Image: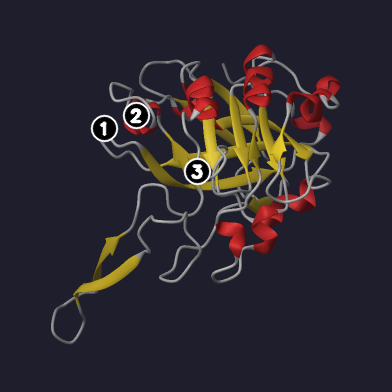
Amino acid sequence: MQVATDICKLDNMDEKIRGEVRLEGSQIHELSQRIFGDMPVYPGEPQPEFKPYFTIGKDKINVSQLILGSHTGTHVDAPKHFFSDGEGIDKIAPETYIGEAVILDMSYKEIGHGITDADLNSYSKSVKARDIILLYSGTNDRLQGQDNTRKNFSYLEASAASWIVNHKVKCLGIDSFSVEKYGFAEGTVHKTLLAKDIGIIEGLNRELKAFVGKRMFLVCLPLLFKGLDGSPARAILFDIKDNQRSFTII
């Protein structure tokens, strides 16, 4: 799908984000998971349920009631997810999840193994301050039914979280249930990133594989739930052409 509008203006209430993103001729690439009743979810979290609330025939309109966890499918974590006094998702600046993204290949590591600072260090020259890093691990390629990948997914080691902080990355995304190892004790990776206001996007879809090695433009926006610990989000990528680099996201 091509973007019909050639300039997307960004301007929010507190003026922290202002600029122009030129998208003329760009393709839109979907990175979000489709949400449905028996989709793979993090072990122990609720399966989505869609229930009719109003139904045409009995009522004038169709309206559905949705029951799902705040970390269902492709989603964003808020500081409140790991800190009792942390900010809710409605307090996170949207520009955290908007900007240039570099897609790094971690699929050479066996599924279920941790990504380390050494793995990221091989991409040091590709990553700039205030970048968004999207990690393709291949985990989501294997999520089928009750596959044991639900507990044995790829994640980040504490050293990788420190690397991200030290390189001033503003947001991290991964095609895995979580950046944290299943059965974690302390949640060190989440706490390291969220304490530094670094965005976390989890559950990107398998299409991320097609963009490994590229630099693109990401827009990923959670719903504005008041005080909530996270939210499902829609994540999309745009191609960046050399003549489209006039945007500034601060």
Residue drawn at x 62%, y 25% as measured from the top left: 158
- Residue 227 has which mark? 1
Is residue 2 among the parts visible in the rendering?
Answer: no
Q: Is residue 23 left or right of residue 42?
A: right
Is residue 137 among the parts visible in the rendering?
Answer: yes
Q: Are marks 2 and 1 in contact (CB under 8 Å)?
A: yes
| Separation (CA) of disc 1 from disc 3 | 26 Å
Q: Residue 225, located in which quarter of the rendered image?
A: top left
Q: Nearer the viewer, residue 57 or 69?
A: 69
Q: Mark 2 is on which residue type?
A: Lys
Q: Is residue 165 left or right of residue 59?
A: right
Q: Measuring from the top left, give residue 56's x and y in whole percent.
A: 21, 82
Q: Mark 3 is on which residue type?
A: Gly
Residue drawn at x 16%, y 77% as measured from the top left: 60
> Quick one: label 3, few (<14), some, or many (20+) residues within 10 Å?
few
Q: Nearer the viewer, mark 3 or mark 2?
A: 3
Q: Nearer the viewer, mark 2 or mark 1?
A: 2
Secondary-structure class at tag 1: loop
| Separation (CA) of disc 3 from disc 2 | 19 Å
Marks 2 and 1, the one that precedes in the sequence:
2
Q: Residue furthest bottom?
A: 57
Q: Nearer the viewer, residue 208 or 157?
A: 157
Mark 2 lies on residue = 80
Marks 3 and 2, the one that precedes in the sequence:
2
Mark 3 lies on residue = 183
